[in-house]
Image (cartoon, helix red, strand yellow):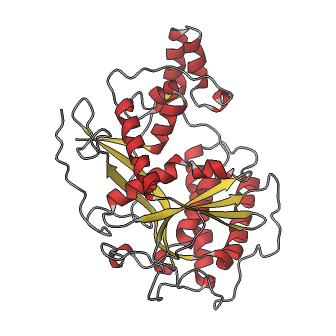
Amino acid sequence: MVALLSHEERAAFKRCRRAWDLGASGRRNLMPRATVELPDPDRLIRDAMAVYYFPGMWDWSRGVVLPLVDQAFDKSLAKQAAHRGPEIPTGVDSVASLAKQLLHAYTQWAPEVDRFGPVLVEVDYQADLTDPDTGENGLFTPGGHHLRYQGRIDLLAVDEHDAYWIVRHHVVKEWTPLDALERDEEAVAACWAWEQFYIGMEIAGTIHNEMRMPSRGPVDPRGMDPPTGAARARGGVAQHVGSGGGRSIPQHRRLYARASEPVDFERVEHDTGPLFRRTWIRRPRPEVAQAGRQLATEAREIFATDVAVYPSPSEACHRCPFSAPCVALYEGRDTEANAILASSYEPRPAPELEEGRLGGVTWSTGRGAAPPRFSGRAP
């Protein structure tokens, strides 16, 4: 048996253990009943980016690809609407329209700055955690379940030097401070986990692809509309180039090859525009290894049978989906809190299998080697 830990649950545990206890899959596993919400522009853009950077279409002309990108955006919007229910909140059209304008502007900006080729998009991974004390044996829960970290990366890319990068798309209101990007736990943990998942591949660093969504529209119309010229180049490293490029994982078995990167390089590089900022951050080997050790240490505490559960009040409490029952518990009104949980929350459904999802892989395809077999045994 396997016990899975996601970044979302890890972050919830560190932010507020009471909210984690109510929402985590291994705990109460609750979620608010359907509410009226605006579309999530971050999810809309990321679904569209999965098509824009799909490796199998990287050498296709923009005139063919961009209508497919728009279709992916519209499909994502319809999927979010289906989960919202029949009531349509005010502002849906304006949020969706502004997000699509931002998407169109990005497809004009990106060809000038793309210095990589896509390898995989929207790909899931799982990595076995090791005992942080020994670094060798597998890590188990007190119940004997093998602990494994799971996640999804937006894009795995390779540059002209055959160096691999994990790319994360962010829709933001303001640029993220550089120190926050450097300390991005999810991104660094993904570097460590991917190297365990795909044995023999070394990740050079992370690319944070930020898209700043204005508070009100329209987005600057210059270069906003998709071009119609089929011959226009898409930028980046082409698939047919001998070194680098968007080749698929089965052809990218880097068990022996190593990146031929320049001797002198900056740890952080920026590509900037009025609405977009791309930050390249190189992750040295000690940083990646430390991320794996810290992840295992936290996982051991999260799954401990005697883990303490308590609230962590902060200015972010008003945004927490469990704020109402938490306040009741905080004030000692346990009966009222239980009533709120029973009336306003429901069990979180099992994750949906996404048939035919772009970039999806399984253990049998697109991998460099089978997952490692640890010598440790469950206690």
Relative to 259, 84 lies left or right? right
In the image, residue 85 sits, relative to residue 309, either above or below, namely below
Residue 347 in which image quadrant: top left
- Quarter of the image with the N terminus is top left
In the image, residue 293 sits, relative to residue 26, either above or below, namely below
Query: Looking at the image, which residue is at 79% across and 65% down?
Result: 274
Residue 257 placed where, x, y %? Answer: 35, 77
Towards the viewer: 324 or 9: 9
Query: Looking at the image, which residue is at 63% across and 70% down?
Result: 70
Q: Residue furthest front?
A: 263
- Quarter of the image with the C terminus is top left
Q: Is residue 102 visible?
A: yes
Relative to 213, 170 lies left or right? left
In the image, residue 346 sits, relative to residue 208, either above or below, namely above
Residue 168 in which image quadrant: bottom right
Residue 99 in which image quadrant: bottom right
Relative to 81, 92 lies left or right? right
Residue 174 placed where, x, y %? Answer: 74, 51
Query: Looking at the image, which residue is at 39% across and 31% down?
Result: 302
Towards the viewer: 364 or 156: 156
Residue 61 placed where, x, y %? Answer: 59, 86
Residue 178 placed where, x, y %? Answer: 66, 53
In the image, residue 363 sits, relative to residue 244, either above or below, namely above
Q: Is residue 32 visible?
A: no
Relative to 248, 272 lies left or right? right
> How many numbered marks, from 0 up?
0
Query: Looking at the image, which residue is at 41% across and 36% down?
Result: 298
